[in-house]
Image (cartoon, coloured by chain):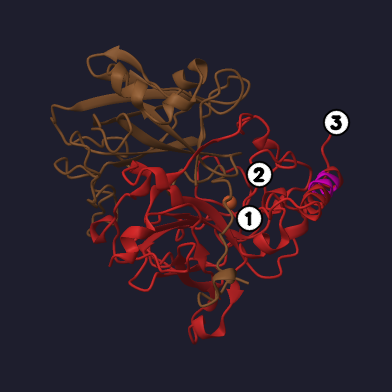
Amino acid sequence: MTLTQHDIDQEIAAEHAAYEKRVADGAPVEHQPRRDYAPYRSSILRHPKQPPVAIDVSQDPELVELASPAFGERDITEIDNDLTRQHNGEPIGERITVSGRLLDSGGRPIRGQLVEIWQANSAGRYAHQREQHDAPLDPNFTGVGRTLSDDSGFYSFTTVQPGPYPWRQHVNAWRPAHIHFSLFGTAFTQRLVTQMYFPSDPLFPYDPIIQSVTDDAARQRLVATYDHSLSVPEFSMGYHWDIVLDGPHATWIEEGR
Amino acid sequence: MTKIDTSNPEAVLPTPSHTVGPFYGHALPFPGGGDIAPVGHPDTIALRGQVYDGEGNPLPDAFVELWGADPDGHVPQVDGSMRRDTASGGFLGRNGVEFTGWGRIQTDAGGHWSARTLRPGARGQSAPYISVCVFARGLLVHLFTRIYLPGDDAALAADPLLARLNQDRRATLIATDGGNGTYRFDIRLQGEGETVFLEFQ
Ligand SMILES: [Fe+3]
């Protein structure tokens, strides 16, 4: 039986309604997706059925997970955050500047940590062997970047606007345009991999991956804001996207400084 | 709204997680990602295992990150895990001398991963362990677990996490000794023998 967009739309609506009802009945707001989200079929066999075992980090300040791996200047090169300069020629597409702050749950900047990104090219094609989408590869675009957050927690990338792409989960399945982000905090518990989207994408309602974040406000936090002050004259469109890392961390160390 | 007003604590809410998807392979893994142990270090151990889904099929599109203390129980704050070459723009690999404690290893076509790192020392109340973070296509939020090494039964018995688990579940966190400093640690995301995953609060 062919899985259609209509089937997926109904499942998304049912998951959303179930979440709204849970909240109305007094359940807490869910800032994170659930790992078992059937409209995204790949999650079905890949989520644990046992509840996670909770560890109260305040019971032991020596936990390895309360420290984070360190990265430094030798882990990046100067043009790693400019995806338009990694080849001999200019990549095709609308140039964009994506910038924002890396913050902890207290709103404090996370300094000197590794921010990694990867994305499709402007035609919606990844420079990845397993990618099957019949859209042109761009010899001048790999779509991979990395940088370190600065002393105020800011990161910045220059790249091109990624295209949306089909992904075959169901007939006519399309991913909204997005940039994948991988982030480290001050504690390994704050590790995050996520995706940044662009404002007003018409594909949002149809995509089970963004809809896996069933809380409307939480989902909005995945969408960058157009920021004219970040647009570079005669060069690029600017987007601002702040990232807040969840997870407990060793605040007592920070407060002592 | 993604410009966050940090002066208002109620506006500072977490960014949701998303799956890594299938196409991280040209972005996140790097050469020597699992060669965490400095070359020739006497406390080197070799770890290997497979990652399985709920039907027992190996995952060819997962990766693990390992994070651990050195043999003295000291957590390194050393960069250089993914050193880059400013001339070619490529990866240089680790320098083979310093221990950063962190590595990233992609599963192969058969779902296998392997790494060489240093035998961790004990910290706090815990038996020695290596922290593991698992990512995969289909996994909407990464999963944390731990690799404990077999051998020191007293230390394992006193570990606060292991003490809370029944015998079957506890066994999923303890690697199997393969001799000569080699250990096997499989990760089962779902179903029979499901690995114990952790949530830090
Ligand atoms: Fe993608």
Chain bearing tag 1 is A
Compared to A44, does A145 lie above or below?
A: below
Q: Is mark 3 on a helix, strand or loop?
A: loop
Q: Chain B is drawn in which colour?
A: brown
Measure the C-alpha gap from mark 2 to mark 3: 27 Å
Q: The red chain is which one?
A: A
Q: Which three-letter amino acid code belongs to the residue tagged 3? A: Met
Inter-mark Cα distance, 1 to 3: 34 Å
Q: Is residue A14 magenta-colored?
A: yes
Q: Depth check: B111 or B1 in front?
A: B1
Specify the quadrant of the image occupied by residue B146. top left
Q: Residue furthest top?
A: B179
Report the side of B174 relative to A133 (left or right).
left
- The residue wearing badge 3 is A1
Q: Which of B82 and B36 is in front in this view?
A: B36
Q: Is residue A72 above or below residue B128?
A: below
- Which residue is tagged 2? A34
**According to the image, label 1 marks what residue?**
A31
Q: Which of marks 2 and 3 is nearer the N terminus?
A: 3
User: In the rendering, at what x and y percent does residue A39 appear?
Assistant: 75, 42
Q: Which amino acid does label 1 sit on?
A: His
Question: Which quadrant of the figure contains the C terminus of chain A?
Answer: bottom left
> Chain ID for label 2?
A
- Circles 1 and 3 in contact, beta carbons < 8 Å: no
Label 2 sits on what residue type? Arg
For the magenta stretch, what is the residue range?
A: A8-15
As rendered, which of A90 and B95 lies closer to the eye?
Answer: B95
Labels 2 and 3 within one chain: yes
Q: Quadrant of residue A111?
A: bottom left
